[in-house]
Structure formats: C-alpha cells, structure tokens
Image: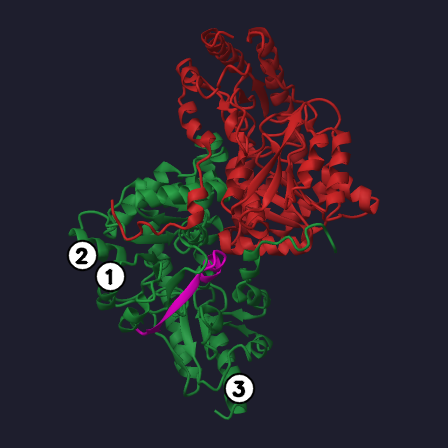
Chain colours: A green, B red
Amino acid sequence: MQTLWDHRYAQRTQQMKSSAIRELLKFAERPDVISFAGGMPAPEVFPIKEFKEACIKVLAENGAACLQYGSTDGYMPLKEMIARHSARYGITVTVDNILPTSGSQQALDLLGRIFINPGDRILVESPTYVGALQAWRTYGAEFIPVPFDEDGMITDELEARLRAGPKFIYVLPNFQNPTGVTLSYERRLKLIELADRYGVPIIEDDPYGQLRYEGENLPAIEVLDSQTRLQGTCYSGNVIYLSTFSKTLAPGIRLAWVVAPPEIINKLSLAKQGADLHTSTFNQIVVYEVAKGGFLDEHVKLIRKTYKERLDVMIDTLEEHMPEGIKWTKPKGGLFLWLTTPESLDCQDFFEDAVKEKVAFVPGTSFFAEGGGHNTMRLNFSNATPEKINEGIGRLAKVIKQHLTKSGG
Amino acid sequence: MQTLWDHRYAQRTQQMKSSAIRELLKFAERPDVISFAGGMPAPEVFPIKEFKEACIKVLAENGAACLQYGSTDGYMPLKEMIARHSARYGITVTVDNILPTSGSQQALDLLGRIFINPGDRILVESPTYVGALQAWRTYGAEFIPVPFDEDGMITDELEARLRAGPKFIYVLPNFQNPTGVTLSYERRLKLIELADRYGVPIIEDDPYGQLRYEGENLPAIEVLDSQTRLQGTCYSGNVIYLSTFSKTLAPGIRLAWVVAPPEIINKLSLAKQGADLHTSTFNQIVVYEVAKGGFLDEHVKLIRKTYKERLDVMIDTLEEHMPEGIKWTKPKGGLFLWLTTPESLDCQDFFEDAVKEKVAFVPGTSFFAEGGGHNTMRLNFSNATPEKINEGIGRLAKVIKQHLTKSGG
C-alpha cells in the first residue's frame, strides 16, 4: 500500500534489525517442539498465588494509587527494598542511585540514549547478549568483541582493545547469556585494573546472579571496583549495575532496575520521561508487595533447586547422546549453556531439520557483534522439564550426527 | 562525585529537558494545595473492583501466560478488541494495523525513533502536548507551530507552513491538551486537503475522543481521510492514529495503542523490541479482561457524567470570580481548559504566590514549541471535586487580581 509515509523513515531505522532469536522463536513455539531456544523462566515456578494475593491486597488498600499516574523516578518503597537487597551483596547505595525500568531491555535502551553517539565503540564479550547489541545499534554503536573461555572474557585480550578507545565496557559476569560462563575472581580484578588504567567505565549486567546452583557467589564487579578505590565504604560510581525481577519473580511483569551515580540516574530518568513517562505504578506496587518480607529469598531457593535439576539432566544427557567432537560449557548457574560443533558444521543450516525432528535451539551467530560462531548454539535448560530435556537432547544429537555424517566429519 | 562516566554523555542528552510540568507537580502535590496542574483522571472513577476481579480471574485461569514473556506485537485478543472497538468509530482496520504500547508516551517515542532525523521539522498546534515535544526533541526534531482559536488549529495559517517541508503534522483534534478546543469538521476536511496537496502525512493523537460531554462526536481525521480517498471502504494509511486506556480505565497500567499501515507497525514493533522488548503481558491480559464485554462503554458514561459536572463547575466559578480581561476556552470534553490573562501578566511569575494561596496550575509557556504564551495557563478539572474546584478557582482569582493591580492592569 502506498501512503504519504513512504520514504519518510529516519536513517536509524535502517540499523534496526529483528533479533533472529525472536523470529526463530515463532517456529519453536509449536506445541510439539521441545524448545531449548527461548530464554524463558519455568512457568512451574511462577509465584501465581502470591501475585494474586498481592493484587487483591494492594487494590483493596491502595487501589487509587495503584491505578494513577506515578513518578518517573519510581515507587519509593520498591527503591528502598532494592537498596536494602543490594546492600546484602555489598552494593552500598541509596534510593538516589536506583531507577526502576520497564524491564532490563529498557535500561539498556536508556543507557544507549544518554551515552552513545553514532560511531561510538562498545567493548563487549564475544558472544554477548543480543538485546544489548539490538538496543545500542539503534544509536549507531559499533562493537569491539573480546573472546571468552570457561572463565569468561579473556582479560589478557583486553588491553589491546582498550587502546581503541571504547566508550564503555559491557559485561555479564555471572552465568553469561548466551554462554553460561562466569567471569573468574582474578579476571574481575584484572578487568577493573585495566578499565581504570584506560579510564573506561563499565556496565555490569547481572540478571542471573542469584541463580547459582553450585560454588560460592563471587563479588559483583561493582563491589570490587568500590573496594579497590574507596575501601568499600561507598559506591565508586564507575560501574553501572543492572538487575531485574524477570528471572526471580516473573518476566511478564516487566520490572528491572539500574544502579548508577545520582547524576546518571537523573539523566536516565529524564530520558525515561520521554520514552514511557513511567513504569506501571500497579506493577511496581504489586512486585513490592510480593517480594517484601523475605518471600523473594525463599522463592529463589525453589528456582535454584528446579533449574539445578534441569541443568544436571541436560549435562548428563549431552554426555550420553552427543557424538565426539561436540563440546559444551558447564555453567554453575543461570539459564543457558553453549554448545560448539566441529567447524565443518553450520548450526543455522540444520535448524530447519531440527524443527522437523521437533527440537529447537538458537544458532549462535546472532550473539556475535561482528560475525562468527557459525558452529555454535545456545541451549536453554530452564523452560523444559527433565523428561523433555532428556528427549530433546536425544533428538538434537540425532540431527547433529546426521549432519556430521553428511559433512564427512 | 567524579567517575569515569564524566564527559561521556551523548550529544542528544543535551536536548533532553525535564518537562516543566513534572517539576511543578512536585509543589502541586502538597495535600493542602488544590491542584489544577496535573492531567490526572479522577481516582473516584477508577474501576478498582473490576481490576481486582480481573486479576483474580486471569491469574487463576491463565497465570503462567500472564507472568511469562510475551510477543512484542502484543496480546492478540486485546488487539482484536481494539480493532472491533475502532470499527465502531469508522476506523476499519485489522490486528495487523495495531500495536499496543507502554502508554501513549511510548507510541510518540517509537514514532520519533523510526521517522525523525536530526533537523526534521514537525508541524504542531501552538500550544501542543508537551510530551510529544519532549519525545521528539530527543531525536533532534524542530517544530513549526500553527496558532489555534476556538475551532482548533487555524487551517488558513497552514498552507504557508506546509511549504516549509514538515516531515509530518501532529494534531490532537478532540479536546486538545492543553487548550481543550476541538478541531471543527470544516477544518478537519481542510487539513486533509492541504496535507494531501503537499504530500505530508498526519499523526492524530486522540486520548480524549470518548470523553465528550456535549454535542455530537466528529469523525476522526483518519476516518475522513480514508473516506475522501477510498470511499471509506478501508484504511488509507496516511493518518497514524493514537489512543489509550489511560483516560478511560487507568493511567497507572500504562497501556495505549497505535493504528498505522502494517509496514509501519512492523517498524514500530522492531523499534519496541530494542526499547522494552514488550508491554507487560499481565497488564495487557488484565485490561482485556476488564474492558471486554461492554464494561468500557458503561464505564465511560460514568466518567463523562463525573467530568461534565466538574467542567461546568469550573466554568461557572470562573465566570463568578475572575476579573475583567481574563478569558478561557469552553471545552466540550476532555480534561483541560486554557486561561489567558492580559499581556501585562506573566503566569510563571505568580505561580509561587498561587502555591502560597494553596492553588496550582501549569503556566502555558512549556506547551509552546518555539516560545510564547507567558500570559496563559492550563487548568485541569478532572482531578478535583466540585467543592475543591469552587474553592480553588476563588483562590486563583484572588492571586490574579493582586497581580493585575500590581501590574497596573
């Protein structure tokens, strides 16, 4: 249809690409397909009863406020709860350091909006979270990828890249999306030291930090940075820290937060005013009601137990079914692991065959800012029962074996 | 506090200004102040009971889906309901023409994101909705203002301005924010004719269309445009139409929608993927549950009755209390009227005195894209009871009289 809008798109619109994942998910959604493709929490652990009780309570006690316009800065009791909660992990901040956002994706978008000029370079893990690439490409960002191994971003490869003058470093230190690996303690210190030497600040994205299934929690990069500079007495401000209720309560509620210096929070809030005025008052009040009083801690234990079982089953069945030459990461938490086939295979090539066998994954290429990763895939283990995981990995192994034979591998 | 983030802001951050209104609202929020400053619906008409029942029902029947990630394109039954609802007003579209957004502010932001290059000029009513100015300044928009009278934008002033090559025209045809005036039928036709002659498309923002308290509804600009071109059989696509549940159900839920050609909906959805992934699944399902089955129509009747009484009281008390030389618009719907003092007064000057007298308004200047309006103010009548309106207008008249005396007026 021809309209007067034709040829009126802004230049940046050309840089907007659909996340390949979201397109693939449409295939993966068919009910007979066992999908390791999404990044969805298990619906079995959603606190539906608690949400229902919270809705009833807050609408009865505070209905008019729940449904009225709210402040862009966010619901104060929620911010106070986030501040208390953060303090337990060593992030010593006040409500002036916190902005609730409409999911972490909005936090990434608002950070792009206030920091990125066209052509600015961002140092990212390779592979990295595709939503960050998508958000920041809109603002004309370019990316400098840093390779990873089982201990996360390889910090020995960092220094040469820091000389290219990145605007900031973006890192997911815990159970990274998509690889599932965790940045080691030594590398966290090395990252901070190098970032400081080159004067480059850090965005630390931590959606999965609480979902550790074995080993000890490592201190947040933010915490180590503040300790190094200020003996840990207060927040250094060099690391902007992101987290979310999507993985610990429910993603459909769209509620996350940013921790940053107050002047950055003010700029983000200003940007948010223009972007969506404010995050739903109702959702902020309901989440506060659900999470307060210790429920969140108890609930996270249930999630850890459920996901640990699923991760273990996935690792076990991979070992059982996969042919030689296939490798995978061994995450200690989170929602994902990362599988690598021999170079001779292209995982995008056999995605269709996999769906025919009724199993789905995400080909790894879309997680690479600057190309690569044709022989990789991301597997999600949180959103399928142990039985389905067992069955699905069997199907996937079958498809991989067929393609290995075809490729002469 | 000095951090490594210093001097790293993007250029566009300098264009982000806080809406003066939102700053002023902080004063107006003091409980002893009678505020005509906000744009809030009356909490007395929020359907709290219906929201509670809907939350209980959808969480019981469909809890996992409510709390899970959803599609960027929006919840299908909600889109179907919006399409049916639009058809009754002559807007004949399908779900492919509809994108739910996180409030109308997000719709304005996403439109700016896909259409506005730095330096693009947007033709706007003068004064106009400050949230649109705020959203589009972020993308480097400039504005071409068109003056208004009691029949809305003065279309005789339009042609010269269309020659300046605006990217699009932005118009609020019904009970405009901030003036409360409605674009007449003749001017709607004239606007379409001129827009067509110069090949300039239109964004029609219609948050208040259903809130008419007297007279007959006028056809949407979208409807007239489609009738003119295509004998009304289908949607012409030249007019992008925005509306919202904020004024008919509740603003705190943050749910609005865009009507546009499918290719534009696809671009907006892509932009939304990067901006906030999707609008809360829970809120979309709850609003669908509340609104479906005729409740919305019945509820809007209650809102109309409540607000009509408040508007009538405000007009009556203005006539009773205001000194000579003060003028105001006489809206037939919506939430606002517009007051003009003699040129000798500056309404920003006496805002502080008004707050001391415990009454608040919004000085008109922030609604003017290119300056002006020092002797104007916006008065909201939806969020104060008739008794408060009577009292508040008395206080405001007292302050205005004092300042008229001072200025020798």
Q: Amino acid at mark 2?
A: Thr
Judging depth in this view, the residue of B109 and B296 nearest the camera is B109
Residue A149 among those drawn in magenta: yes
Distance between the alpha carbons at the discs numbered 2 and 1: 9 Å
Judging depth in this view, the residue of A23 and B287 nearest the camera is A23
Pointer 3 and pointer 1 on the same chain? yes
Ranked by sequence position, the earlier of labels 2 and 1 is 1
Q: Amino acid at mark 3?
A: His
What residue does disc 2 label?
A228
Q: Secondary structure at mark 2?
A: helix
Q: Are marks 2 and 3 in contact (CB under 8 Å)?
A: no
Extreme residue toward the left, this view: A231
Ranked by sequence position, the earlier of labels 3 and 1 is 1
Distance between the alpha carbons at the discs numbered 3 and 1: 43 Å
Q: Which residues are magenta?
A: A133-150
What residue does disc 1 label?
A192
Q: Secondary structure at mark 1?
A: helix
What residue does disc 3 label?
A403
Residue B56 visible within the image: no
**Residue A393 position (above or below residue B255):** below
Distance between the alpha carbons at the discs numbered 2 and 3: 50 Å
Residue B179 visible within the image: yes
